[in-house]
Amino acid sequence: MDGLKKFLDIAFLNEHIHHKDIKLFCSSINKMTCKPASVCVYPEHIEAIQDCLSRPQVPVTTVLNFPHGLHEWDQLESDILHAVSLNVSEIDIVIPYGKWLSQHDPLTLVQFAEYCRDAVGDNIVLKYIIETGVLQKEALISEVSLLLCEHGADFIKTSTGKIVPGATILATKAIIKAIQQYHQQTNKKVGLKIAGGIRTSEQAYEYIHLVQTTLGAEWLTPRYFRVGCSKAL
């Protein structure tokens, strides 16, 4: 079980969170013998979470343009700069998937991805959430994933977890196809984050097996593979 926990991005994205809830959440993380890869929170809770986590601190991830990918540039820029100023370790950003589906213009994603990468900088792990349950078609998922790989993604993440379906094996295979293609072209690795509907260790291990048999064992480190969930599995 500890072998699984090192891959976990444990999400604390409940509504109406109070300080006592944050303290209880952090207490449960601090007691874990094998720490998760990160904890994922809304921007307004970054500082409180950082204060409550034990040292050495578990990396903190925040979510932006969440959950529907509809924020305007000014708001997104402000949110990114705020998160960067608070020294978050990682940022998960929802792509404007609705605009992509309506326009199907690669430049839409390229400009978005390059803007986010430049604003985030090189020292923060950047994960793009593509919402596979909305994109649905495997060819579209692969196309979007490859574009993001080519324009600054450290990880491709399946879903926000706010719609159904979230992660699926077929959608994950489509992302893996793009990651493989990018690696073959550049010899650079992009990570994969599975999120949305992962509630049991059995589900998580199914994806671990998929990664091992496609991308290979070298991807099975927290640097290149994560499982997003709302609790320690």
Image (spheres, rainbow, N blue to C red):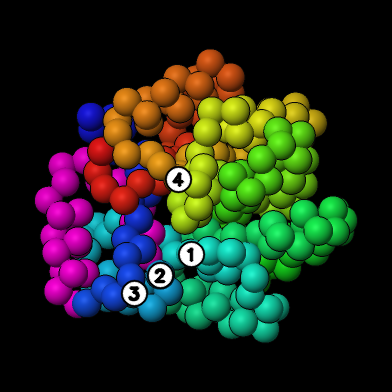
Q: Position of residue 65 (x, y in %)?
A: 58, 69
User: What residue would you read off at disc 1?
Assistant: 63
Number of the front mark, 2 or 4? 4
Q: Residues within 10 Å of mark 4 (few under 14, many from 20)?
A: many
Query: Which sits in the foreground, 218 or 149?
Result: 149
User: Where residue 128 sits: x, y (%)?
Assistant: 60, 54
Three-letter code, disc 3: His
User: Disc 4 designates what residue?
Assistant: 196
Residues at marks 1 and 2, CA–CA distance in whole angstroms: 6 Å
**Foreground: 188 or 31?**
31
Contact check, label 3 and label 4, Cβ < 8 Å: no
Of 162 and 81, which appears nearest the observer? 162
Q: Residues within 10 Å of mark 2 (few under 14, many from 20)?
A: some
Which type of secondary structure does the marked residue at label 3 adopt? helix
Circle 1 sits in a helix, a strand or a loop, which is it?
Answer: strand
Q: Amino acid at mark 4?
A: Gly
182 relative position to 122: left or right: right
Q: Which residues are magenta?
A: 19-41
Residue 45 badge: 3
Q: Residues within 10 Å of mark 3 (few under 14, many from 20)?
A: some
Q: Earlier in the sequence, mark 3 or mark 1?
A: 3
Residue 47's place in the image compared with 169, above or below, is below
Q: Quadrant of residue 215?
A: top right
Q: Nearer the viewer, mark 1 or mark 4?
A: 4
Residue 188 visible, this orientation: no
Gap between marks 3 and 1 measured at Cα: 11 Å
Residue visible at 62% across and 40% down in the picture: 190
Q: Answer yes or no: do the residues labelled 1 and 2 have beta carbons within 8 Å?
A: yes
Q: Is 130 located above or below residue 84 in the figure? A: above
Q: Earlier in the sequence, mark 3 or mark 4?
A: 3
Q: Which mark is residue 42?
A: 2
